[in-house]
Image (cartoon, helix red, strand yellow):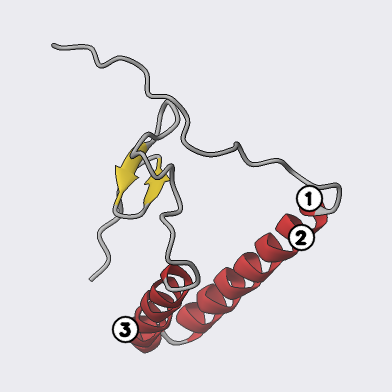
Amino acid sequence: MAIEPPRKPTRHKWQGEPNDAIKLAALRWYALMAETSMIQIYATNPSYYKTLCGIMRDTIKALEKVTEKPLGDPDGDCPEGYVRCGRECAPMCDVID
């Protein structure tokens, strides 16, 4: 197996700001509330499964349109333990129709 030489960074690394933890916690809260609502809806009426999947599929597509830049490194490098999945790096790729 050929070993590629390390790539030189083409942009500055992300630098956090003091209030990033609060903002990220707020985003996580929204995600958890959406998950809780979907579980409650499905648990009370499983016939909504396809509707819930459609809502989440549309949400993911909308989030992908927030930025034109790839969410991962533009050079295609992902951190150790992650793989390139379309425009982002993730522990594994999920297929969403």
Are the residues at dot 3 and dot 2 in contact (C-beta closer than 8 Å)? no
Q: Is residue 50 above or below residue 4?
A: below
Q: Are marks 1 and 2 in contact (CB under 8 Å)?
A: yes
Point 46% across, 80% down: residue: 42
Q: Amino acid at mark 2?
A: Lys
Q: Could you say where residue 7 lies in the image, as x and y percent from the top left?
A: 37, 24
Q: Which residue is mark 1?
A: 21
Q: Is residue 1 above or below residue 57?
A: above
Q: Of the residues under marks 3 and 2, which one precedes in the sequence?
A: 2
**Label 1: element kind:** helix
- Name the residue at 45% across, 30% down: 79
Viewer-proximal residue, 71 or 24?
Answer: 71
Residue of label 3: 50
Q: Residue at left 23%, top 71%?
A: 97
User: SS class of the residue under badge 2?
Assistant: helix
Three-letter amino acid code at the position of disc 1: Ala
Q: Residue furthest left?
A: 1
Task: Check the image and report above or below for 66 versus 74.
Answer: below
Mark 3 Cα-neighbour bin, 10 Å: few <14, some 14–19, many ≥20: few
Pointer 2 local density, CA inside 10 Å: few below 14, some 14–19, many at least 20: few
Distance from disc 3 to disc 1, alpha carbons, whole Å, reads: 34 Å
Asked if marks 3 and 1 touch (Cβ < 8 Å), the reply is: no
Report which quarter residue 73 is drawn in: top left
Q: Quadrant of the N terminus?
A: top left
Q: Amino acid at mark 3?
A: Lys
Of labels 3 and 2, the one closer to you:
2
Residue 39 at x, y percent in the picture: 52, 73
Q: Which mark is residue 6?
A: none
Q: Position of residue 9 (x, y in %)?
A: 47, 30
Q: Earlier in the sequence, mark 3 or mark 1?
A: 1
Left or right of 17: which side holds 27?
A: left
Q: In the image, which disc is placed on residue 23? A: 2
